[in-house]
Structure formats: C-alpha cells, structure tokens
Amino acid sequence: MVRRLFSCFGKGTATATATAAATSSDDNATTDLTPEEQRRAGPVVVELFSSQGCATSTEAEGLFSRLGRGDYNLDVPLVLLAYHVDYWDYMGWKDPFGSSQWTVRQKAYVEALNLDTMFTPQIVVQGRAQCVANEPEELLSSIASAPRVPAPSFQATFEKTTGESLQVSLTGTLRTKVDNQGVNVMVAIYECGLVTNCAQGANKDRVLANDYVVRRLEKLCSVKDIAAKKSISGTIDFSLWEGFNAAKCGVVVFVESPSHHIFSSQKIQLPNSLCV
C-alpha cells in the first residue's frame, strides 16, 4: 500500500498521538535557571499548521483563538503562530493565506520529529513536540512540559518605507549563550481577526475565522559562539500585503536551532503610528 503523504485529522484519530523529539546534544542555546527564573522564563511558541481546505482545521482554529484569549487560564505565556499550508488547495478552495513556504516549514518538522505523514491540523510546541491540533488535552500537556528559557530582549524600530514595504530594525541580546552549532534569529508578522466566506471545498458555505495567521517570516541573522549578553542587530524589509492593517498585526522574534528546536521568543507590538 502506498503511504499517504497528506492527511486531515479529526478528534480521536488513532494515529493522532502526541510525540516529542528526544532531547539531543545539539541544543545550541543554553542557560542555567533557578526555580524563580524558570517561573519568569519567556513564552512557549505554539505553531499551528492548518488550511481552510481541511474540514477538521476549523475546530483547531477555534481552539487556537481560545488559547490566545486566555480561556484555558494557563500560567505559561504563549506565542501563537498559525501557518496555512497549500497542499489542500487542489480540493476546490484555494486558501487565501496558504503558502508553499509554510508547507516547507511543516515538512522540516515532519523530518525532525520522525513522522510518517504531513497532516492538518497539526500543533508543534517549541519545535520539539507535536500533536493533532483539535485534541486540547494533548496540546495543554505539551505546553505545560515545554522547556523555557528567558525571552530575548530586543528593541524595535519600524519604518513604512513605501506603501508596500515595512522596515523592521532590531537591536538587543538573546539572553542565552549560543554554542558553535549556532542558531537562527527569525522574525514573523502575524495577523488576527481574519474572516473568510468559503465558497468551495471541504468548508463550503461556511464563514471561517482565523487568528495569529503568519503573513511573513524572515531570518534576521544567524549567530554562533556568543555570550548571552552580547548585542546583536539587524534589519528586515517586509513586503506588505493588500489590506495590511497594523492594528490587527503583531511581530514575533524567535530563536531556533538548525533542527528547528525553538529556544526563546519575544512578542513586539506594532506602534500606533503605523495604524494611520
């Protein structure tokens, strides 16, 4: 039998067990935390891989929005990022937020976590554990057990260089020591409050609500062999999409290893001056 390359999972799917990557020696950013520092450590990054072309993703999107609203009363701060993959677009509805870039990112997790299948809706926590996204118990358990380190400390400046471009300049420290294997410092722009009238496909005639949708993701820089307090800086020019509304958007900086383990993250609010 030919192995399925893609799947759309619902609640209680037999193959939908949570998995975690084994801790390995290639964890490239380290810090020694006291119990109090652990309590005050940075956010946990929760990534959702979803699609408007997957019938079971709608429930997961609702759960994801509830996480963002704080409905689960977690003691852990979260960074939420939703990536809409494009491999369900052939089913009759082209996801307006879908991108092959997000499919490639999910494929990297499939390989890193030794999975057999790419599927939606999928949750990945800190790049180390994954589960089906509409299984709240497994999701909350993965969040509670996720490793945490201090958040980076970046200051950001923003300049809308043209009507179609946003320049983001960042200066700060990672607050974690990086070894010679190195890490990548990534910057994402996400958008909330998106509403789509779905005319075709698996969700035909439904009104779909999506939050924390990643619209842009770029690498600020790669670093290795640096101390926790060493200052780093960089600038990214983001191309803006039609209908960009800064009031609905946010910026996330996160630090990940080449194997996509996420160590730390920081949320940055866009300034009010961009909202006019």
Image: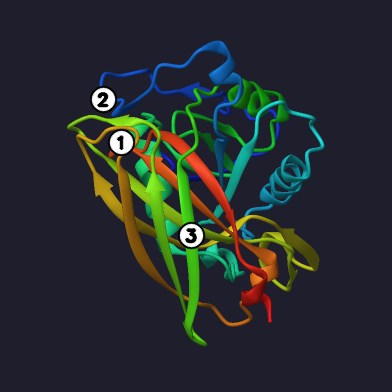
Whether tag 1 and tag 2 are in contact, CB under 8 A, the answer is yes
**Residue 97: quarter of image:** bottom right
Residue position for label 1: 259
Location of residue 102 with respect to 5 vertically, above or below: below
The quadrant of the picture occupied by the C terminus is bottom right
Residue position for label 2: 26
Pick the front one: 119 or 276: 276
Name the amino acid type tagged 1.
Ser
Pick the front one: 118 or 261: 261
Mark 1 residue element:
loop
Residue 156, numbered circle: 3
Residues at marks 1 and 2, CA–CA distance in whole angstroms: 8 Å
From the top left corner, tell me how far across and down residue 124 is, in percent.
Answer: 52, 36
Residues at marks 3 and 2, CA–CA distance in whole angstroms: 30 Å
Q: Residue at x 40, y 31 (%)?
A: 115
Pick the front one: 161 or 207: 161
From the top left corner, tell me how far across and down residue 258 is, in percent.
Answer: 28, 39
Whether tag 1 and tag 3 are in contact, CB under 8 A, the answer is no
Name the amino acid type tagged 3.
Ala
